[in-house]
Image (cartoon, rainbow, N blue to C red):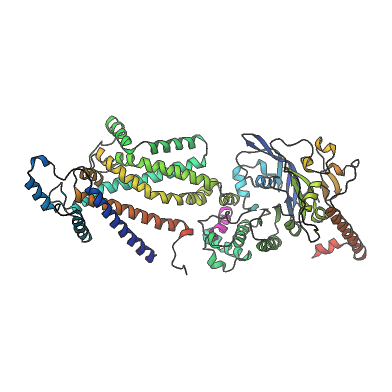
Amino acid sequence: MDNEKDILEVRNLQVNFKTYAGDVKAIRNVNFDLRKGETLAIVGESGSGKSVTTRTIMGLNASNARITSGSIMYKGQDLLKKSEKEMQAIRGQDIAEIFQDPMTSLDPTMRIGRQIAEPLMVHKGMKKEKALKQALEMMKLVGITDAENRMNDYPHQFSGGMRQRIVIAIALINYPEVLIADEPTTALDVTIQAQILNLMKELQDKISTSIIFITHDLGVVAGMADRVAVMYAGKIVEYGTVDEIFYNPKHPYTWGLLSSMPTLDTKGDELPSIPGTPPDLLDPPTGDAFAARNQYALKIDTEKEPPFFKVSDTHYAATWLLHPDAPKVTPPAQIVARQEKYATMQKDLLAQQQQHGPVEEEEEKQ
Amino acid sequence: MAKYLAKRIFYLILTLFIVITVTFFLMKLLPGTPLTNQAKLSKSQIALIYQQYGLDKPVWQQYVLYLAGAVKGNFGTSFQFSDQPVSYLISSRIEPSLQIGLQAIIVGVIVGIVIGAFGAMKQNSWVDTSATVVSILGISIPSFVLAVLLQYYLGLKLGWFPIAEWGGFSYTVLPTLALAAAPLAESARFVRTEMVDVLSSDYIELAKAKGLSRMGVIYHHALRNSLIPLITIVGPLAVNIMTGSMVVENIFSIPGIGEQFVKSVLTNDYPTIMGLTIVYSFMLCVVLLITDILYGIVDPRIRITGKAN
């Protein structure tokens, strides 16, 4: 867990949007690290600040965005201090992004071979012919059949899933260190979603890139991510490994998110939902922003913002419920079931470890 | 493509036929006669002249005769200038009109694109505001007012350009400017709106994420996509210039077809009116055909391909 493994470190990030009504505090003090080769999922509902976070990393925020504090360290350099020119050299070269809607994110009047080749021409100064040759290889890599002929086609001649493969090819052509995937499967059919996710995982191994995976779909997270950060109202409220977030969640908001996701064990007719709507970030509430929607809210939640409490070395949650003096509450039944499952999993793991020695090392050798 | 062209040419002929028919009968409703001094002529003299020009026959017969001639390429003889065939009259006068018209549309559209693009790139800045002011002025000031202003200030006061007549490029500058204002304003407004739209689209975001510079994004991705819809208004702009030219040519005393058209309407010169109407409709149809073909070339989504099956 030392710093050398971190490729990206976001510290105390605050982003406001200037509007006629006042400043919208979209990102309120966000901290996270992205480790080399891992996939970090950032989960949260619409408006929680997931996309603004990634836009800020790319330096592509709307013109009314003001970064009021914080730093984004990439390879020892603060991206927020870089000029537009310097950021242009990083975008598409070191940090690339996959966008949400493949139907609109390709230029309708440019041949797709050229679109994939463009980052090579911009960053490596390659001639068109040579860049197109590499683009062709990349098209084959992302699974576009008959690539030789299809590279001269235009986006409208491709299906949604194929277009997203093209968008992925564009993002990966320069083998970026960091790949930001902003809800890359939201606009796709469910059957295609799985294909694209598999492709991304496969390519991550080949290209050895680190991924920030933005989504509101927890189902996708389970299969994709190594670690998860849950965002609410411009803040990260809980983060940990996938298992920790899925089977031992501590923040009531995470409970709500998980309970509203149907599983094979879900019983009854009605899927639980989180009541209410997210707070107005023009004037964020004092204390815990989730308090108003939280049936487990304590009095202190409306007065003082909860700090991060440590659950394990890798798992932290910002809720007063973890304070030693807090009353014990019983989470929703589904969460309790998850936690029990987790406990038995841990026990099994421990038993296995005692029998065969540490499992982790074996995995690393592979 | 060949099939498409053949179809379009058939439609063009059909359109011309309808235009000829409608114009012919409407023209007969014009008040007055082709005779200059009707009061001084006796009844028999009038009858003689009418007979000579075929005006004594019933209107439908005149129409059939005209059509029969037109198919063979005979558009009759001008009433105004005795013994001048209409085809000669037009061909000898079309060059100045074409030159001014083409110059006006090229200057207008290109300058309009530049102004519109800058307005969109610097949205809500002073550049944008002045671009908007220019387009509002260009749209609201009629070409004949602008023509007179240009004539007075640039021609008479400053003496930079000849104020009227025809003879060389310098004579074309003022009429071109007068005619270019409307297409300039129209395309600037259009390009600005389109470009603002395009600049906020996802593929521009992706282009930025690729690391393209600001100008690279504009040049490689934004411009082409914002210009495609502009092609659709080139047709109406051409009409605008054609109608504008009738007045502007008169103001600058340019021996073009626009000036001739006005004269022939005032003197009930039926064959010339018909001939010029056909020429104007033909030019418009050709402009529309060109824009449609152009559309397919610039926008791959509506390209006409032979491999439809």
Range of the magenta residues? A101-124
Among the 4 quarters of the image, the one containing residue A133: bottom right
Seen in the picture, residue A325 relative to A202 is either above or below; the reply is above
Q: Is residue B36 visible to us here?
A: yes
Taking B259 as reference, is A213 left or right? right
Taking A314 as reference, is A22 left or right? left
Residue B14, how many percent across, how many down? 31, 59
Residue A325, how many percent across, how many down? 91, 40
Residue at point 81%, 56% (across, down): A243
Residue at point 82%, 51% (across, down): A249
Find the residue positioned furthest to the top.
Answer: B157
Seen from the viewer's position, the closer of residues A158 and A295 is: A295
Residue A200, how many percent across, how many down? 68, 60
Seen in the picture, residue A247 relative to B170 is either above or below; the reply is below
Taking B222 as reference, is A176 left or right? right
Seen from the viewer's position, the closer of residues B45 and B20 is: B45
Identify the image quadrant of the C terminus of chain A. bottom right
Residue at point 40%, 35% (across, down): B137
Exactly how many numbered labels are in the figure? 0
Seen from the viewer's position, the closer of residues A161 and A178 is: A161
Residue B36, how many percent across, how many down? 13, 42
Q: Is residue A37 visible to us here?
A: no
Specify whether residue A77 is painted magenta: no
Specify whether residue A103 is painted magenta: yes
Residue at point 34%, 47% (across, down): B239
